[in-house]
Amino acid sequence: MEKLKTYRQIRSGGIALKLQISNDGTAKATDIRVYIDFPEEFLLYDISDIEDIKLPKAPELPKNPIKKAEEEYAKRMNPAGAASINWIRSFNHSQNNTMRSISALSRMMLPSPYTSSTNSSLDIDEHCIAAEIQQIPHRASRLFDGIYIVPTQKGTFKAEVSIMCSEYLKPIKRCIDIEVI
C-alpha cells in the first residue's frame, strides 16, 4: 500500500524544477558549488527517472486450492509433460531477467541529457541538489533543468542553500521558505 501511495505522489504531486545560477558580480566566478538541502518531506528525482517508475504490482492472491489439486493430478498422470512446462517457464524467466539487465546497463552508459556541458555537473540525491560549474562570466547565468521535486506532506518548510566559489572566503548560506498547500 505504501508503494502505491509513493507512486501516486510522484506521478501526480511532483513538479519539474529549473535551477538558475547567476553571477551578478563584476568579475568572473570560478569553481562555483551550490548545494540545496530539502527537508525529508521532499523527494528529488532526475526527471528522466520518472518515466521508469512503474505502477506497483497488486499483491498476489493465494493459489486456488482446486486448481492446485488439478495441476498435481495432471503431474501424476503425465510427469514428462509437467517437467517440460516447468523448463519452458524457467527459460522464459531467465531470458526476461537477461533483457532487463542489458536494458539497465545500456541506460547507465548513455550520457544524461541534463549535463550537456563539460564545465558543469548536476547531482540529484534523495533530498539534495548539488550543482557545480567551473566558471560563469559576470552578468551571465547557467540554467539546470531535469529536476523533479515531490512534496510528501502539506505544510511550511525550509530548504537550506549553500553557495561557494573560489572568490568567496566562506560559503553564503540562505534558507528558502516553501509552502505546500
Image: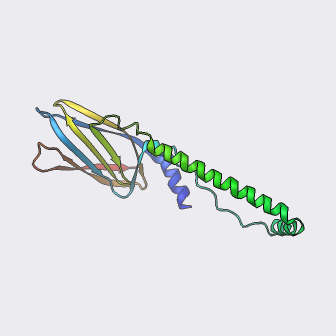
Quick check: 133 above or below 71? above
Determine the residue positioned at 42% across, 49% down: 150
Colouring: rainbow
Residue at the right extreme, as displayed: 77
Lateral position of residue 77 relative to residue 140, left or right:
right
Please name whichever residue, 14 or 114, is drawn nearer the observer in this view of the structure: 114
Residue 77: percent from left, percent from top: 90, 67
Quick check: 22 above or below 126? above
Determine the residue positioned at 57% across, 61% down: 1
Residue 78: percent from left, percent from top: 88, 65
Determine the residue positioned at 72% across, 67% down: 62
Residue 89: percent from left, percent from top: 72, 57
Residue 144: percent from left, percent from top: 33, 38
Please name whichever residue, 43 or 106, is drawn nearer the observer in this view of the structure: 106
Quick check: 63 above or below 99? below
Label count reads 0
Whether residue 126 is visible, yes or no, is yes
Whether residue 54 is visible, yes or no, is no
Lateral position of residue 28 relative to residue 98, left or right:
left
Please name whichever residue, 31 or 168, is drawn nearer the observer in this view of the structure: 31
Please name whichever residue, 84 or 75, is drawn nearer the observer in this view of the structure: 84
